[in-house]
Amino acid sequence: MSDSIMKLYGTRQRVTGKRNPMIYGHFIEHFHRQIYGGVYDPGNPLSDEDGFRSDVIEAMKKIKVPVLRWPGGCFVSSYHWKDAVGKNRVPLFDKAWRVEDPNSFGTDEYIRLCRKIGCEPYICTNAGTGTAEEMSDWVEYCNLENEGQYAKWRIQNGFPQPHKVRYWSIGNENYGFWEIGAKTADEWGHLVCEAAKMIKHVDPDTELTAAALTDLRWNINLLESSGQFLDWISIHEYWDAIHQTNDYADYEAVCAYTNNIDHSIREVRGLLAAMKLDKKIRIAFDEWNLRGWYHPNVHTIEQGRTKEDYLYPRDKNDENSRYTMADAVFTACFLNACNRHCDIVGMANFAPIVNTRGCIFTYPEGIVLRTTYHVFDLYVNYLGDTVLDGWCADMPCMTVRDKQGGTQETDICDFVVTCFSDREGLAVALVNKDPAEEQSVQLMLEGAGEAVLYYIAGDSTEAYNDIGHTEVTIQRETLGAYTPGMTVHLKPHMVGVLQIG
């Protein structure tokens, strides 16, 4: 245990903002087993009458998934939505991932999934090989009552009421060479403007975002061309970029990644403020995870020739023993950052929710809830919705070795102080990054009532969950009556939420 005791302060008199529940959103793409054999598995005894895995739906409902982004991701940039509605489905050769998609899961199935979960749909459109008109036709299909051929087509397909999809993204990562139909900054600004114009003509109540990154020229061009139409700006990031190698950063290197966890938010916030758009446009961090998905020899100039080169290796994403407390600690630190920036970050989508690097793993007889699932459970079900300005005195640091072999200093703990808008009480997110030592924090917070700590830790940094192997679950510890100055002891590699009230 460290000799110094951190002192954590926070007060209801200094409110950062009320966080949008959509920062706990998720993402699902037509990649590997996320859709087929994941959430959608007709014929499986665990699936319902519509082909959806009931156990997966229940797990998603437990963490109150607020918004689900679909269908991509890179997949969407050669996806034509009209091939995947109605009775006559046309199979697609997915040029992004080099597989055939049967198109049996399309727009109407996705909307049905969202309704079962109770979440908002968020559709990402094809801005690669698609056109502005095709994007706006999709909005017609989903949102118009009965005007035009596409609304009538939806009605004919058995959906008399509009799907009412509010959130739409123009494109995915169209700035990247790896994306089908990549664009220059000038091309992007023009396409987004025309697509946004047509979409708003179909349904003025849509909320639009478009692909961006921390590149000044790209963003300035986008915002000058289309800022008047946009409600959001989209950014993506995977810190451990192991798409080609599957070479996982170890626990120490993951802790080093937490030093730079919100750099994209800070940079995009600064640009929005400089362009006087920070009160109009919010950040949607709509694709994020610690680890990049493993898909070798696809997003490369030299393509894999055989399925052993590029397809079968994707099964390595399914190794549950790789999703440890390192992933949980990073996920909690990222969500803490989103909470601290809740005045500008209104949405974030963990990528993905099912299989690949997801927090839910499926197999024919059931599911595994990985360590990251329990982080969402803690934050969604125990943390408050109003973020207070919290600060810490005497925060110790630890030295960690990063993935490049250098050393970095990182704060030993991470925290967010919150309260509830609908009741009394406080809830504090507490993360101890230290891999071996317990840490103590003295709470100098105004409040009264019982103090209860909900947490995950496992027996080591390498703790994980798998089929028939459960090391990480939420634990509950009653600490007694709270008075300001109470000291709380945090287990090594722990993610927790302390409720007071």
Image (tube, grey):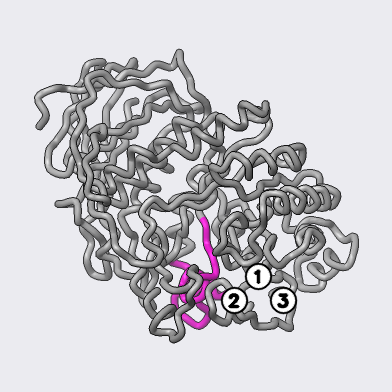
Residue located at (30% from left, 33% from top): 414
Residue at (21, 22) in percent of width and height: 6
Tag 2 residue: 94
| Residue at image mark 1 | 78
Circle 1/circle 2 CB separation < 8 Å: yes
Vertical order, 492 against 174 (above or below): above
For disc 3, the marked residue is 83
**x and y, in percent, of residue 125 in the image:** 68, 60
In this rendering, which labeled residue sits more in front, label 3 or label 2? 2
* 479 to 248, vertically: above or below: above
Question: Is 37 one of the magenta-colored residues?
Answer: yes
- Label 3 and label 2: CA atoms lie apart by 13 Å
- Foreground residue, 239 or 83? 239
Which stretch is magenta? 27-55
Numbered badge on residue 398? none
- Quick one: 346 or 153, which is closer to the camera? 346
Three-letter amino acid code of the residue under disc 1: Ser
Magenta stretch, overall SS: loop
